[in-house]
Image: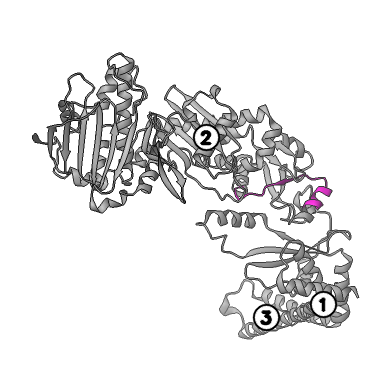
Amino acid sequence: MQTGKIGVTSENLFPVIKKFLYSDHDIFLREIVSNAVDATQKLKTLASKGEYKGDLSEAKVVVKLDKDAKTITVSDNGIGMTAEEVEKYINQIAFSGANEFLDKYKEDAHAIIGHFGLGFYSSFMVSEKVDVITKSYKDGAKAVKWSCTGSPEYTLEEVEKDGVGTDIVMHISEEEKGFLDDQKISEILNKYCKFLPIPVVYGKKKDWKDGQQVDTEEDNQVNDTTPAWTKAPADLKDEDYKNFYRQLYPFGEEPLFNIHLNVDYPFNLTGILYFPKIKSNFEVQKNKIQLYCNQVFVTDSVEGIVPEFLTLLHGVIDSPDIPLNVSRSYLQSDSNVKKISSHINKKVADRLHQLFKDNREDFEKKWDDLKIFIEYGMLTEEKFHERAMNFFLLKNAENKYFTWEEYEKLVKENQTDKDNNTIYLYTTNVTEQYTFVEEAKNKGYDVLVLDDVLAPHLINKFEQQYTDKRFVRVDSDVVEHLIQKEDSAKEELSWEQKQELSPIFQAVCPEATDYSFIVDFKDLGESGSPMVITRNEFMRRMKDMSAMQGGMNFYGDMPENLSLVVNTSHPLVKKVLDAKDKKLGKNLEELTASVTVKKEEIAGLEKAKEGKKDEEVPQADKEKLDALNSELVKLEEEKRGQLTEFGKSNKLAKQMVDLALLANGLLKGADLDKFVKRSVELIK
């Protein structure tokens, strides 16, 4: 037996390894099993070159758990090591056996993982002692055992071993004894090793017998050595892709379609990406893409590594050009990763465009499940946005689909306003906004359906991109004003008239904390609705956007301002106004006359003050002006009070407001019950 010291630069290396080499200690098993696979592949390469004559038909990696001995052993029948190689590759961390091997056999060893070196030392994260029992494939080689307790000192001695290969025996430390669990080991192997290219065996397959699971004689192979993405697309059928998806996501809903990546220049990249069905409420689970390096699992946290919108996809990306590195920040800054990210972005856009061109009808059927993904990409990746304009679809209220260019041609002539802006009318809910949609259609307008949470953001982007186009929701104004063709020729009420009528209808508006009403008056024609509730486009859109963003809640926390538009031409509204004149006419005339007199007196005093300094104005005039203003306020309050009381007592006014609320889904609970009872009374 010989003893020695590992060629490290610091006595503190092992404590650092134990704590900080990998943030997730589970990875130790990935590293050790990957090294074992690597060693086996090396021997296969040598055999193909005629440098090894042994039997490799049973080549595999075996993982064993011994709870009594508190050990986990990973065994391979790969290339093995001589005593000198153990000295070189294990004791001198600066050298990498795999890298030297790659230099020698780079023409044939393209599939070698190549991380035996630092990865081996991950075993010390969970072990108080590690033994390496190994026998080289070379003729006459003696088996040796290397042992280390996690300090720079080690022992190396000759031992007996049947067959070539290496056993890594990890004596699990007390603080990591959670790894001495059969289920835990199975989970780790399933996560990191299920697609390694050499068979990995853990225990025996189980069978159900006499009410319990028992081991059979058959080895339990945990991995699929030739997953779908490693095969040529020409060798796979649609069912193969679906089966592989079920293998990745056993309980997942069937995807829409897939993209098979197969690139060998200017970098190596394979993989299969699936488009899942994404609902319009954006309830999606990210991190469904699994990142591999030569079939070794790296991470499923790909945000920052691939474009943000691609994190909505499912599937596998595999590239030897992606470093098997523990730091995501390193991955994100790696130049190869950036190139791969850009390439996938282009491939996804190209695939979508091809699907659109090949079978537009099928593409339209899938659009509602696809649109969130495409919109997300258009909002977050400018290059994808440019490409996506070739297949981005707009759907209207008749469930017809249009490309951007097609829709512009459809509405350009009829929906261009007096300022030469093309107006894209839209609804966010055809059922809830049915009346507004129908009124717009009756005017000869077309109405788009933009009903997902990303729509407000995309609308903003389009309006910034195309300054001569505006998106207007159908309930943001009365139909006559949605697209202003010319200045209105209809006579509208004066400000004073509106001030007099407003309290009547304001009095019967609901008092809600989450929205408030502004009463306005417009001539909508005798056949128009008596009252219409509209929502300001800008404010509503800002609220929708802030509701999704979560952070910028300035608009989200504000009550919604709704406009109650009273149709001055409607017979029922005229009936209320006639009742007002009948009941309050004389009083209002007297109050209005008094108000007029006070305003004239105030105007005269204000005119007399013009050009004078404050001290030059007689004190008597100042006092008289204050008194007149005070009297004017009282008169206007009295007038408003009488109108408010009249409004509260007028069932017809209340009924019309409630009808408008009902049409907008705002009449609920007790108010709805009162409306129904009042309706019965008015019908009698």
Give the number of the disc on residue 629: 3
The kind of residue on which mark 3 rests is Asn
Element carrying mark 2? helix
Residue 166, image x and y in percent?
25, 31
**Nearer the observer, disc 1 or disc 2?**
2
- Seen in the picture, residue 139 relative to 490 is either above or below; the reply is above
Give the number of the disc on residue 244: 2
Give the number of the disc on residue 21: none
319 vs 8, left or right, is right
Residue 43, image x and y in percent?
30, 22
The kind of residue on which mark 2 rests is Phe
Residue 14, image x and y in percent?
19, 44
Asked if disc 1 and disc 3 are in contact, CB closer than 8 Å, the reply is: no
Image quadrant assignment for residue 129: top left
Please give the name of the residue rendered at 75% of the width and 74% of the height, measured from the top-left corner. 508
| In front of the other: 425 or 399 | 399
**Nearer the observer, disc 2 or disc 3?**
2
Spatial CA distance of label 1 from label 3 is 32 Å
Give the number of the disc on residue 650: 1
Q: Please provide the residue range marked out in magenta.
A: 437-454
Spatial CA distance of label 2 from label 3 is 82 Å
Q: Earlier in the sequence, mark 1 or mark 2?
A: 2
Residue 308, image x and y in percent?
49, 41
Spatial CA distance of label 1 from label 2 is 69 Å
| In front of the other: 586 or 146 | 146
Please give the name of the residue rendered at 8% of the width and 34% of the height, measured from the top-left corner. 1
| In front of the other: 72 or 124 | 72
